[in-house]
Image (spheres, rainbow, N blue to C red):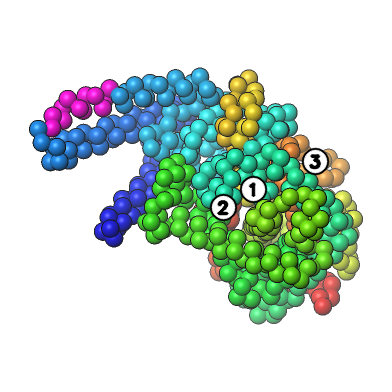
Amino acid sequence: MHLENRVLSSVLDYASKFYKRMSSLVFFSANSIQVQMNISQSSWIKCRDWMAFALSHHIIMGIYLLILRNFLPQVVPDFEWQHYFMRVFIVHIIYIIISYFIRITRYPPGPPPMAVFGNSPFVNILTPEQTFLEYREIYGPIFTLHLSQPTIILAEYKTIQEALVKNGQQTSGRSSAESFVLFTGDRLNGDGVILAMRQKWKDMRHEISRFMNKWYGAPMDELVLHHTRCLEQELAKIAETKSLIDLRDPLAGAIANVIQQITIGRNYMYQDQEFQTQLRDINAVVKEIMTAEVFFVNCYPWLRYLPEGILRKWTNYKRSGFRLQQWFRTILEEHHVNRHQGDFMSHMIDLQESKQEQFRDLSIILTCGDMWTGGMETTVTTLRWGIIYLLNNPEVQAKCQMEILDVFGNDIPDMGKMNQTPYVRATLSEIQRLANVLPWAIPHKTIEECNIGGYDIPVNTEIIPALGAVLFDPNVFESPKQFKPERFLDEEGKYRVMEEFRPFGLGPRVCLGERIARTELYLIFASLLQNFRFYLNRGDPIPVAERVIGGITAPPKPYATRVEYLGNRLIN
């Protein structure tokens, strides 16, 4: 049995490596082949997709032939492989034809899918928005990619708006992929808030909104500023050493404590071992969900029942997720005994006991996990990108600091004067646009049939609203790959609201934490620039604004900066 597991593990590991190598080969060879053949990018992409489609099915037929010719004759006496091969060949051809007609009649147009892998190898996992824009040039603003299942990609703002606003209720479902059902246990309605659907989602979203109304305004500002002061004290100590520092850990500590205070009424010292364990588990869940092994499990759900250890990344994803659930379950049990005041978990327990709403313990646990994970990782990643752009554009940093000092002087920044700092707001918006920390967005699913862009979309169809493609759309943002805060300023130097700039989404499922995130980003960014300068010495490695594979989020490559304390405001 152990030998069989090792063999199966090796086969699946090889498949994962093959998937990664094929993806790398595609993007490495594409430019050189395109140049040699002297054809347009769109023509090359169409040619590449059809060649891959044909090759993949040719390989499948080769596997059939290998089994029928070399394996079965040893098991079955007098086995005539030629006769059976023709049957298999005909059945496979019929399958391809039927699949093709189902695809063109049920879904918008798109590239032909490879056998087993679908279109996944041709989607750049680091910059999917660029792949979506390339396919948009060929198939239009709405097209179909075969990922773990047929998925509708919306790659233009008007199309996304039509889907998420006009058809907001019809497209308010969430994916039922195995990687999600694993934790929710409810394939029909999901659970928590991010993955919940239908009435369960409406009830939980209503309670979160009702609870958060108590925090918005002064209480939220005070909470964020309190933890910002703790962050500033730590940076002041680092500044004294004049050494290079990776800011990820200090930023994560400050932002995580804001979210934890709201959700579970707790604060941790960053060095706390329990806190470090939770951060590692969050990082594992966010990272492993985009791996090839998890992709295979979503495509072929029976793989989840294999013995643990065969799919190592899937096992790590599963264990980390369940450890987080158990941590929140322990805190929930403590809350039942010793109730905190003012945190979300206590609010939900009060509802349980008053029997006004029937929320399961698992729903509360998953919702707290959603709020913590979603509220921390995206904000930390955005601020890390922000420091990179400031290091590479010191004139922008200086201009932001000048505006902050003109408006706030030595006073603590506050949200009430945010509109008086248009350049700081523009810089933050440009950081969010270029960072595009959720390049894949969170997939939606149709819970009713609807019409989008002239196409009738069947029920239970996954939809990816590619807002990241809009952020890099040259028709919306001129020179979209350039860092240019001025694009968010009008002719009078006032902040310009752009309808297409929607980093938090739109429609009924717009991010519930938008107001928290905006408060955190502005107050932390303004406070740090008021008191610190981020710089590099000659000879220090210059950070490159490039992504690494970070899972569902898009973090920058690790980098370090030096910090100078300016002393514009007393830190205590």
Name above or below for residue 218 compared with residue 334.
above
Going by the numbered disc 2, the residue's amino acid type is Phe
Residue identifier under label 1? 191
Dot 3 or dot 1: first in sequence order is 1
Q: Residue furthest left?
A: 78
Q: Is residue 86 magenta?
A: yes
Secondary structure under tag 1 reads loop
Residue identifier under label 3? 497
Q: Residues under labels 3 and 1: Cα distance?
A: 34 Å
Where residue 188 appears, as percent x and y from the top left, is 60, 40
The crowd level at tag 1 (other Cα within 10 Å; few <14, some 14-19, many 20+) is many
Instruction: Name the image quarter holding residue 497.
Output: top right
In the rendered image, which quarter contains the N terminus?
bottom left
Inspect this view and state whether residue 254 appears: no
Where residue 397 appears, as percent x and y from the top left, is 73, 59
Instruction: Name the image quarter holding residue 468.
Output: top right
Where residue 284 appears, as percent x and y from the top left, is 53, 60
